[in-house]
Image (cartoon, grey):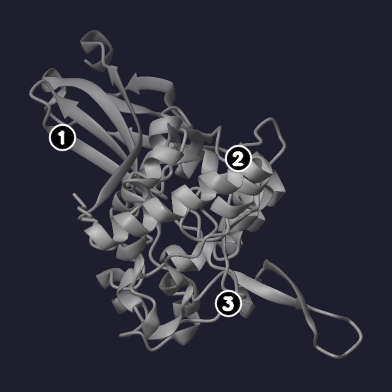
């Protein structure tokens, strides 16, 4: 848990600011009050780049819930993870670092008259993102998504805060935000979105939550609860939301000559991108078909792997059919069921993220 202690000086400073604002409010109306509260700059170090930025933990002093979620996410470990270190040959491939430790996902627009006058801030393209060379341990940190190139905070909400904040609700609620780095998955999403499913990346990977954006005192007393998103950025969040996004079933079952045969059908019914997805890293989805005995022991097994690189991934709306045939030998009197498991795994098969599971009982008379 994060603890923040306000000394007497800080408390008096905040109290003084609020007192002044209250006086101005009475004299000038609530519009000016709101404007003043949203343009205070009590933490200028948060918009600094380089070694002057204290790190995302400083943001966590106030945004306690969001920080705790981020620290448990893959974004916070995007640079320091062993998988990334190995995949980049000890960080040799600098191309990868710009999305695993970016300065910011924003870029400046310029005039077309050739004078290179900076006019506005917009979403950056993947090849425009600059990799940072400081605070690398934070990976995709708070500044990566919320600090624009002209050093202003941006987000889906505005409100009373000890630092200026610009509201850009449309961008932060769209899949464009995630697509800045997850380019290939975003291109897939654009191909399939709208076919009866308009969910964004955030809808699945950032679960909805109603809460105050700030939990620290005294600022949380000036806030009301708002509809927001958890900063988990997790495939597990998507699975939790759509537990039946993969349809998995046995079809055309038959038994003859003491053999058990049939098909397993897989349909990606609710996801607007392929499974697996993503261009880089090891991404495998594995189907296991197991013949089980009455003690739950696997007698026979068959597996099928799915890779994006081999074009064997499960595309949105696509039905895949895998056939199997088992000869139980002399163990037919012990066989009771078939099961099919679909999960994502890593190179050495030590990690498993389960997508779907189905079992069927076998009628003994049909096996004999």
- Whether residue 355 can be seen here: yes
Identify the secondary structure beneath mark 2: helix
Identify the secondary structure beneath mark 1: strand
Indicate the position of residue 100 as horizontal and vertical percent values: 43, 72
Q: Which residue is mark 3?
A: 129
Residue at 33% over, 74% down: 54
Residue 26's disc is 2
- Whether residue 159 can be seen here: no
Residue at 43% over, 86% down: 93
Q: Residues within 10 Å of mark 3 (few under 14, many from 20)?
A: many
Q: Which residue is mark 1?
A: 299
Q: Residues within 10 Å of mark 2 (few under 14, many from 20)?
A: few
Indicate the position of residue 81 as horizontal and vertical percent values: 28, 69
Identify the secondary structure beneath mark 3: loop
In the picture, the quarter occupied by the C terminus is: top left
> Looking at the image, is mark 2 or mark 3 nearer the viewer?
2
Q: Is residue 183 above or below residue 322?
A: below
Residue lying at the far left of the rendered structure: 295
Q: What is the distance, in whole Å, between disc 1 and disc 3 at their CAs? A: 52 Å
> Looking at the image, is mark 1 or mark 2 nearer the viewer?
2
Question: Answer yes or no: do the residues labelled 1 and 3 have beta carbons within 8 Å?
Answer: no
Indicate the position of residue 68 as horizontal and vertical percent values: 29, 50
* Front position in the image: 327 or 215: 215
> Looking at the image, is mark 1 or mark 3 nearer the viewer?
3
Question: Answer yes or no: do the residues labelled 1 and 2 have beta carbons within 8 Å?
Answer: no
Is residue 307 left or right of 23 when viewed as pictured?
Answer: left
Residue 152, image quadrant: bottom right
Residue at 67% over, 45% down: 28
Mark 2 or 3 closer to N-term? 2
Q: Is residue 268 above or below residue 8?
A: above
Q: What is the distance, in whole Å, between disc 2 and disc 3 at their CAs? A: 46 Å
* Front position in the image: 325 or 305: 305
């Amino acid at each position: 848990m994060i603890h923040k202690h306000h000394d007497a000086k800080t408390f008096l400073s905040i109290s003084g600011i609020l007192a002044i604002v209250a006086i101005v409010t009475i004299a000038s109306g609530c519009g000016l009050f709101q404007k003043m509260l949203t343009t205070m700059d009590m933490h200028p170090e948060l918009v600094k780049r380089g070694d002057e930025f204290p790190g995302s933990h400083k943001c966590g002093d106030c945004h306690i819930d969001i920080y705790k979620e981020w620290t448990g996410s893959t974004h916070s470990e995007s640079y320091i993870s062993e998988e990334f270190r190995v995949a980049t040959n000890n960080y040799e491939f600098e191309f990868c670092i710009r999305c695993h430790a970016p300065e910011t996902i924003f870029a400046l627009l310029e005039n077309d008259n050739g004078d290179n006058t900076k006019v506005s801030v917009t979403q950056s393209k993947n090849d425009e993102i600059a990799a940072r060379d400081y605070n690398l341990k934070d990976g995709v940190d708070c500044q990566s998504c919320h600090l624009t190139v002209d050093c202003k905070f941006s987000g889906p909400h505005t409100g009373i805060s000890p630092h200026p904040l610009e509201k850009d609700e449309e961008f932060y609620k769209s899949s464009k935000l995630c697509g800045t780095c997850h380019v290939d998955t975003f291109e897939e999403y654009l191909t399939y979105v709208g076919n009866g499913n308009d969910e964004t990346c955030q809808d699945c990977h950032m679960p909805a939550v109603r809460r105050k954006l700030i939990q620290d005192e005294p600022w949380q007393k000036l806030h009301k609860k708002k509809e927001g998103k958890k900063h988990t950025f997790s495939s597990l969040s998507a699975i939790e939301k759509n537990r039946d996004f993969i349809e998995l079933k046995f079809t055309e079952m038959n038994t003859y000559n003491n053999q058990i045969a049939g098909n397993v059908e897989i349909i990606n019914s609710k996801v607007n991108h392929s499974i697996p997805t993503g261009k880089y890293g090891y991404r495998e989805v594995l189907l296991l078909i197991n013949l089980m005995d009455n003690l739950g022991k696997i007698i026979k097994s068959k597996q099928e792997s799915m890779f994006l690189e081999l074009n064997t991934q499960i595309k949105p709306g696509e039905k895949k059919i895998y056939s199997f045939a088992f000869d139980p030998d002399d163990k037919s009197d012990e066989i009771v069921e078939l099961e099919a498991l679909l999960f994502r795994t890593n190179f050495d098969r030590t990690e498993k993220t389960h997508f779907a599971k189905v079992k069927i009982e076998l009628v003994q008379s049909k096996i004999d």
